[in-house]
Image (spheres, rainbow, N blue to C red):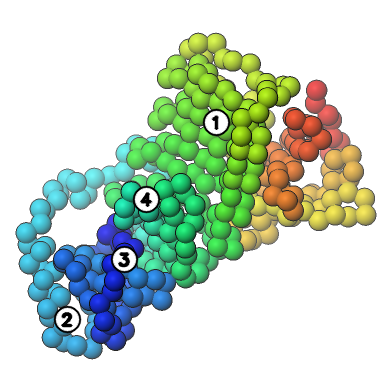
Amino acid sequence: MKTFLMITLLALPSLGRADTFVLNDGTRVEGSVTGTINGTLLVQTKYGPLTIQLTDIKEQKIDDPAAAAGIQSSSAAAAAAAPIPSAAAATAAPPAGQPQSSMTATSAPGLSFVTVSPGAAIRLQVYMDDGVIIATETFDASGALLSSEGRIGNGVYTEYYPDGATKTVKTMLNGKADGTLKAYYPSGRLQAEAGYQGGLKNGPLRYYTEDGGLLMEASYKADKLDGWKTEYGPDGAVTSRTYYSAGRPAAVQPGAPAALPAGRKPEAPAQQLPATLVTVQTRRLARGELFTFRLNDKLIGRLTLDEGSNLLRKEGKVPDGTVKAFGKDGALSREFVFKDNQLVLLRVYGAGPTPAQYSYSDDRAVKLK
């Protein structure tokens, strides 16, 4: 799918056919041929205009046999001139430690996406369901969404490296990124993770070295830096630290984290578990609040807390990790930390520059200093 580009030229007159293209990587594209330019086929789909390299077309189902023969002939001639990858490269297994996958980068079943860059100022993300394009998004160089076509269904979408290794995993909800996005090195080690709500970054963002050390960590609110942004050197020592408010550097706030000694890499607190793909909805009760947890739109659990954050009732099973709750204004309001299906820590935001934190003993909230 890396050959898909947004058409920036004036399309030729439509030939009016509704064709189905099957590409070498198994992807299927449906649309009307509008012309050819320099070895590429121009196709108008219901999700927007795309171009396809003739060498990438394995089969084209059309009503015009002469046109089909012409395309297949051009594709075969170009393919014959192209270098043939070695057998070793074609069959190489994912590196040790890579999340296992039975799919390849270009024929992945289920929900997937691919990122291509038609130009320095444009980035295009193409979403697929079982290899069929369902939607496209176009972004500018800063990451701002310029346009979108089609409908992105709710669920977890995966991007793959050419050898089939997992590259990026994200959850889409109502057409927007929602939950934790994770990116991986080709080796399978975590490269970056960020929290999203409604397509905007909300919560922590972290970048890691391939050996697991922190490169950078920051906090976002409504897609703007909000809180500490810290950068680390190769030895784990802090190289810079800046406090942000609404996207702009601000005066240092109380509770600034202390710099780490040279040579020491940051260690996560005992109760700081990775964020999960679980989402949570909040509903006010007469005395307290009800929190409903879902994974991929499936109900997995509920918690009821009283006004003192004491646990009144728990149902279902929530996986280990940190689940973030956001208010109607998009601000982070709570973080629930689960371990062994137990609520072990609660962070409550909004009362000051740092959150109030509670541990639990026999369902009673114990405030931490």
Q: What's the CA distance linking mark 3 and mark 2?
A: 22 Å
- Residue located beneath label 1 in the image: 217
Can you give x and y, in whole percent of width and height, for residue 176 in the image? 56, 58
Mark 1 falls on what kind of element? strand
Rate crowding at label 1 as few (under 14), some (14 to 19) or many (20 or more) other CA atoms within 10 Å. some
Q: Identify the residue under disc 3.
A: 7
State how far apart marks 3 and 1 are (Cα).
37 Å
Observer-nearest of 343 and 340: 343
Total marks shown come to 4
Q: CA distance from mark 3 to mark 4?
A: 14 Å
**Image quadrant of residue 234?**
top left
Callout 2 secondary element: helix
Q: Tell me the quarter of the image containing the N terminus.
A: bottom left
Q: Earlier in the sequence, mark 3 or mark 2?
A: 3
Q: Local crowd at mark 3 within 10 Å, few (<14), some, or many (≥20)?
A: some
Q: CA distance from mark 2 to mark 4?
A: 35 Å
Whole-percent x, y for residue 251 in the image: 68, 24
* Residue underneath mark 2: 68
| Residue 182 drawn at (x, y percent) | 49, 44
For badge 3, the amino acid type reads: Ile
- Are circles 3 and 2 on residues that touch, CB within 8 Å? no
